[in-house]
Amino acid sequence: MGVHEFLDTFAGLPVVRWDEATPEVPPAVAWWMTVERSGETFASVFEQVMELAGPAGPTALIVSDWGTPNLEPFPVEVLTRSAARLGGLRALFLGEMSGEQCEISWIRHGDITPLLEGFPQLQHLWIRGGAGLELTPVRHENLHELVIQSGGLPGSVVRSLAACELPNLEELELWLGVAQYGGDARAEDLAPVLAGRAMPSLSWLGLRNAEITDELAAAVAAAPIVARLRVLDLSMGTLSDTGAEALLAGQPLTHLEHLVLHHHFLSREVARRLVDELPEVEVDISDEQQVEDRGRYTAVSE
């Protein structure tokens, strides 16, 4: 998905706006909430959602705007101090905002470690925005999917994530972004992940929206984890023939179900080679880009 699209479903559940819900709305929905009226606060809207969602709270919760996301980080403590009331929470998405609401690189977060510590049953965690984001390495037994969408993901967060113990994580998607907006991660920061040690159940790896896609492709080409992936996603970045040649010269990719490379800077000859040499793999080489005066660019930065 892009930053101008809103989810219709989340964690397999239909999305329902909190202010459009009726008493007949079944509990098996993903509740979408935002702060948009004068006098509202995140805490006050959250209490209304809790009243609507029932005794165990929402199974899935999507938070859009929490008031001043470009100035104040998401108020994690509102959720953590209500952990006992959120016994049913299994999926959480913080920051589902369009660029018109707040540019992705302006969305502020703080330390998200308390969310993982406070919700041990959480299975899906999505974060949009990387400014001020922090994470301390933790162990979480039940997380199956982690998505961090950013215009610039700090290397410190990537290193902490790689040091986490996530034995049941199956899907990891990181939008690494550009250095101009804080995205200073390098391929070496992902070494424990690429080696297959940190996340033994991982089968879906997305290293997306990166200005270092060629560097990532070269690292992935020799990474032990690739042998057990179903999906490898290097889309939305700056992939050139250099990175694609590294993939083709590296370990076999014929076992993949999907190789996702859309928004790329490949020549048509090399793009065709990828498709021809991986006939059993669904290779997405759509959205071909042209190098501009500023060079190659990611799909999303500001």
Image: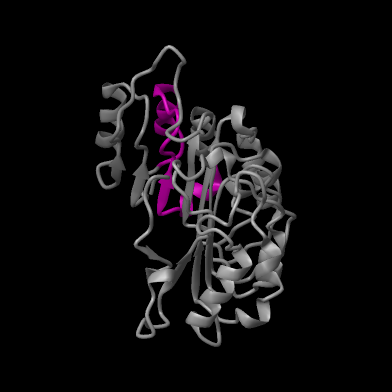
Give the colouring mode of the picture: one colour
Residue at the farthest front position: 38
Q: Is residue 62 above or below residue 182?
A: below
Q: Position of residue 273 (x, y in %)?
A: 28, 29
Residue at the farthest right position: 136
Q: Is residue 241 magenta?
A: yes
Q: Position of residue 161 (x, y in %)?
A: 66, 51
- The answer to which of 140 and 73 lies nearer the viewer is 73
Quarter holding residue 123: bottom right
Residue ID at (51%, 85%)? 54
Residue ID at (53%, 73%)? 90
Residue at the farthest bottom position: 55
**Seen in the image, is 165 located left or right of residue 89?**
right
Q: Is residue 266 above or below residue 149?
A: above
Q: Is residue 24 visible?
A: yes
Q: Is residue 26 magenta?
A: no
Q: Position of residue 223 (x, y in %)?
A: 55, 42
Residue at the farthest top position: 293
Residue ID at (28%, 35%)? 286
Q: Is residue 122 visible?
A: no
Residue ID at (43%, 30%)? 249
**Seen in the image, is 79 located left or right of residue 18?**
right
Q: Is residue 147 above or below residue 187?
A: below
Q: Position of residue 257 (x, y in %)?
A: 33, 52
- The answer to which of 10 and 26 lies nearer the viewer is 26
Quarter holding residue 182: top right
Instruction: State which region is magenta.
Output: 223-252
Q: How many marks?
A: 0
